[in-house]
Image (cartoon, rainbow, N blue to C red):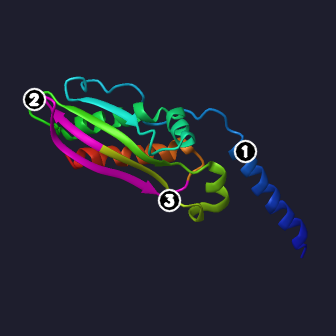
Amino acid sequence: MRTGSSTGCFFLVVATSMMWACASSQPPVGGITTAVPSGASNLVDVTVNVDATSLPDEKRRVFDSYHGPDQLKNAVLAELLKTGKRPAPGPAEMKITVTGFRLRSTASVVGFGMMAGGDGLEVDVVVLSDSRVLKSYKTGSGSVMGGYSGQGRLDRLIGTTAERIVRDL
């Protein structure tokens, strides 16, 4: 039995996988669309901002490179349409501030799996009607589920966070 060649082959496959994972350039826009869902314009005015004091520059750049603010806004609008919920009987405004974000690199997911920690998204939500605060709350989501695609992991975070934002209205 030649264990040396099989061990070498294993390390070659792992090293190649990690180099492939690290070589990606601009992340693709994934399953959650950056287009406003049709019929959502009359529901609520949703704005998503990233808190510069809570999120370091690098994390903000990563979130923005995946079109995170647009994806979160549209996921919330789509969830409102799906559930039929409205934040207020009349015109309403929903201000969402991203206060925490972590998306593991594909290399760390491939190389270390759950030991690399989890991905996470934390937000503060303020619902207003006629400039009056109706509700203010914090929510978010986290996951240690892997996947080779950073966009796929981000889609899960955004989708779950949008569901929780609408659920907690």
Frontmost of labels 1 and 2 is 2
Nearest the camera: 146 or 137?
Answer: 137
Task: Tell me if mark 1 has few (under 14), some (14-19) or many (20+) residues whose alpha carbon lies within 10 angstroms of its own.
Answer: few
Label annotation for residue 28:
none
- Is 39 included in the stretch rendered in magenta? no
Contact, mark 1 vs mark 3 (Cβ under 8 Å): no
Region of the chain picked out in magenta, as a range: 125-146
User: Quick one: quadrant of the C terminus?
Assistant: top left
Counting residues from the N terminus, which is met first, the one under dot 1 or under dot 2?
A: 1
Residue 39 percent location from the top left of the image? 24, 24
Task: Give the overall secondary structure of the magenta segment.
Answer: strand
Q: Name the residue under label 2.
A: 90
Quarter residue 88 falls in: top left
Give the Cα distance between marks 2 and 3.
39 Å
Give the Cα distance between marks 1 and 2.
51 Å
Q: Which residue does the image show at 46% across and 57% down from the upper left?
A: 143
Q: Which residue does the image show at 66% across and 34% down from the upper left?
A: 25
Q: Which residue does the image show at 31% across and 45% down from the upper left?
A: 124
Q: Mark 3 points at which residue?
A: 144
Q: Is mark 1 on a helix, strand or loop?
A: helix
Q: Can residue 124 be seen in this view?
A: yes
- Tell me the kind of residue under disc 1: Trp
Q: Mark 1 points at which residue?
A: 20
Say above or below: 93 vs 157: above
